[in-house]
């Protein structure tokens, strides 16, 4: 069976996360740009793609640090006004990465903070998607994460489909079974002796 990945999933897996090596690793010095040898020393802090950090974490080779996009500064800005925070510049896959990194870093507050953030931005993205036309690109769009952009586009296209339907698009048709004349109780009783 072939594995099919969408491009967003692949790109999310490439997001860099900071790890600390818990053991000395021989022959992988290229992972640490500061290493002058072919080895990575125990305690070395290195930025790795999420997929590699996750694999090394599962083998107990590294510990994963909380990514800076989930730091206290971000959460304080979100609490002040979630709709105005530029999450895309911090991490285009903010929600997905947060869900996947939370168990690795052992920070239970990330999950509830992600839920609070998404709930605060969800309604705004849908409302703006319903109100915006296809000709203009709203100025807030670059602030949205990939997940929020998809939500916005879904709202925009559903509103366009609704408007098309409203002005004369395809209509619902009566089912052929509904067009038949109903039989009276006497006719039904005559058919079922």
Image: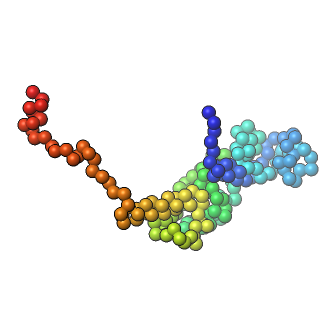
**Front-most of 156 and 106?**
156
**Front-most of 71 and 177?**
177
Residue 101 in percent (x, y) is at 65, 49
Query: In this rendering, would 163 be left or right of 53?
Result: left
Query: In this rendering, would 64 be left or right of 155?
Result: right
**Front-most of 143 and 190?**
190
Residue at the (26%, 45%) spot, across then down: 176
Residue 33 in percent (x, y) is at 86, 53
Residue at the (63%, 56%) spot, across then down: 93
Q: Which residue sits furthest left?
A: 186
Residue 88 in percent (x, y) is at 63, 62
- Kindly tell me whether residue 123 is visible in this rendering: no
Residue at the (61%, 67%) spot, across then down: 142
- Kindly tell me whether residue 82 is visible in this rendering: yes
Q: Can you say which quadrant of the picture contains the C terminus?
A: top left
Query: In this rendering, would 75 be left or right of 21?
Result: left
Residue at the (51%, 68%) spot, across then down: 134
Q: Can you say which quadrant of the picture contains the N terminus?
A: top right
Q: Which residue sits furthest right?
A: 36
Q: Which residue sits furthest top?
A: 193
Up-down relation of residue 107 to residue 139 (above or below) = above
**Front-most of 90 and 178?**
178
**Count of marks placed on residues:** 0
Residue 79 in percent (x, y) is at 56, 66
Query: In this rendering, would 105 be left or right of 150?
Result: right
How is the protein colored in the picture? Answer: rainbow
């Amino acid at each position: 069976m072939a594995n099919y990945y969408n491009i967003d999933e692949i790109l999310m897996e490439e997001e860099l996360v900071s790890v600390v090596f818990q053991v000395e690793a021989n022959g992988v010095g290229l992972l640490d740009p500061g290493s002058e040898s072919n080895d990575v020393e125990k305690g070395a802090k290195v930025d790795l793609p999420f997929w590699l950090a996750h694999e090394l974490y599962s083998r107990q080779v590294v510990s994963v640090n909380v990514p800076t996009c989930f730091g206290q500064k971000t959460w304080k800005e979100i609490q002040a006004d979630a709709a105005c925070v530029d999450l895309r510049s911090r991490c285009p896959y903010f929600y997905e990465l947060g869900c996947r990194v939370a168990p690795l870093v052992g920070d239970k507050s990330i999950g509830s903070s992600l839920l609070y953030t998404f709930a605060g931005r969800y309604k705004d993205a849908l409302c703006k998607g319903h109100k915006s036309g296809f000709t203009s690109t709203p100025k807030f769009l670059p602030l949205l994460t990939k997940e929020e952009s998809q939500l916005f586009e879904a709202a925009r296209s559903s509103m366009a489909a609704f408007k098309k339907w409203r002005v004369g698009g395809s209509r619902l048709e009566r089912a052929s079974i509904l067009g038949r004349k109903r039989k009276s109780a006497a006719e039904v009783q005559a058919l079922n002796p």
